[in-house]
Every structure is written in structure tokens, then in C-alpha cells.
Amino acid sequence: MTRQDSTRQDSTRQDSTATDMADPVLARRGLMLILTSPSGAGKSTLTRQLLQNETDIALSVSVTTRSRRKDEIDGVHYHFIDRVAFERMRDAGELLEWAEVHGNFYGTPRQAVEDALSAGKDVLFDIDVAGVKQLAELVREDMATVFLLPPSVSEQISRLRRRASDEEASILRRLKTARAEIGHWRDFDYILVNDDLGRAFAELRAILHAERLKQRRRPKLEALIGELGRDLDKILEAGRLPS
């Protein structure tokens, strides 16, 4: 495919998305695209590419009690709050899912996600298997879940070793977690194997586009179906085509 062809396809996709959002009959509820993987599968790269190349989708921004790092921006990487505020949100049912990791709390604010979905915007989630299970108990109809796998353990280890911050002990901990995570693969709607980044990205985009067209995400189609049926009934009852 040439660059010009690719640009034309992207333009067509963006125009189609804009038309869907402008036409009340075609308007849809947004979806929650959940991308989960063991460490070393390439999830961060695919997440970044999807956000750069797709419209009407944004990364879910979690709340956390962890201290902000120097290169992090509040409201972009996380919403940084204290433990008291987090516990208040959790106890009030304001979090779709939450977890404690190494003494720090992380969670997904419910209202921000619901506002996006109601406006026809999609939300991308980068969460672990436990988080997916919590979400599924509350909002399964809004979700499309994708489990990303490395092509082999040797390739997974090579990718982890290329991370300058990962020492052998850290890699072994990640592999232990990965061993537990892959046992849940049947719980996901889609399984992708990242043996070729370009193909994996194309497949992820295809999943997003197909999920956007699912019947349950386009509730106002019922009005169109009703109108078509009534018009057809009138023509058939008259026994002749309209002039």
C-alpha cells in the first residue's frame, strides 16, 4: 500500500466516524477496549500506536496513591490523590476496578468512563487480568477484551532484557506473573500473537472497527428499522411502487 492510499483510507475512516457521530440514527455508544498482556508482549507499543492513529479513543487515566515521578503529569499519566481520597472513592462505588500494587492503590474512575461512552467516545484500558475480571462484573456489555501474547518465551525474555531497568530478578518475577496470567486466555474475546508488530497493530485496529459496528452499540438503529418496515408495508399494501 502506498502512503497516498494509506492517507486516503485514514481520511475515509475519519469522515465515516464524523458522519456516524453527526447522524442520530447512526450514533453509537462508545466501547471500552481492554488490552491485556504479560510483560514483554509489546502492549505499550501497540497502545501508543493505536492512540496516535485512531480518532474518538482515549486512554483511561487511573487514580493512584503512588507519588508522582518527575516526568509524570497529573491528569495525563495518572490522577495523583492521597489514600484518604482513594478510599472514599472506592467505598462510594466511584471506581470501576481497583487494586493494591506494592503498597500503592490504583483504580479506574467510573464517571469519566461513563461520560465518554455516553458521548460515543471509546476508552482504551491497559490493565491486568484481575482488573479485567472486576470490570466484567460491572460493565461487560461495554467491553471488548484483547489478550496479547508474545510468540515465544525466548522472545519474551529478549524483550524484557532490552529494558535497561529490568534485572534478572525482576524478569523472573514478571515471568512468574505471566505464567499465572496466560491461564486466563479463554476469558478474552480476542487473542493476538505479537510475532509481527505491523500485523498485530492491523489486527488490533480491525477489532476496534468491528466492535464499533456491533448492533448493541447502536441502539438508535431500531428507529431506522421501524421506519423501513412501515414504508415497505405501505408499498406492499398498495401493490404498486411510489411515483
Image (cartoon, rainbow, N blue to C red):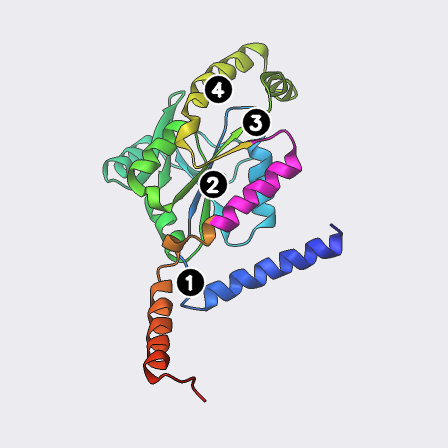
Query: In terms of sequence position, does the residue under pointer 4 or pointer 3 come before the other?
Result: 3
* Residue position marked by numbered label 4 in the rendering: 178
Q: Residues within 10 Å of mark 1 (few under 14, many from 20)?
A: many
Disc 2 marks a residue whose amino acid type is Asp
Looking at the image, is mark 1 or mark 2 nearer the viewer?
Answer: 1
Q: CA distance from mark 3 to mark 2?
A: 27 Å
**In magenta stretch: residue 179:** no
| Residue 132 image-quadrant placement | top left
User: What secondary structure is marked by label 3?
Assistant: loop
Residue 30: x and y, percent? 42, 52
Height in image: 49 above or below 132?
below
Give residue 143's position: percent from left, percent from top.
39, 43
Nearer to us in this view, 80 or 170 = 170
Q: Residues within 10 Å of mark 4 (few under 14, many from 20)?
A: some
| Residue on which the image places disc 2 | 74
Q: Position of residue 50 (x, y in %)?
A: 57, 44
Q: Which residue is mark 1?
A: 27
Residue beneath disc 3: 41
Label 2–label 4 contact, CB within 8 A: no
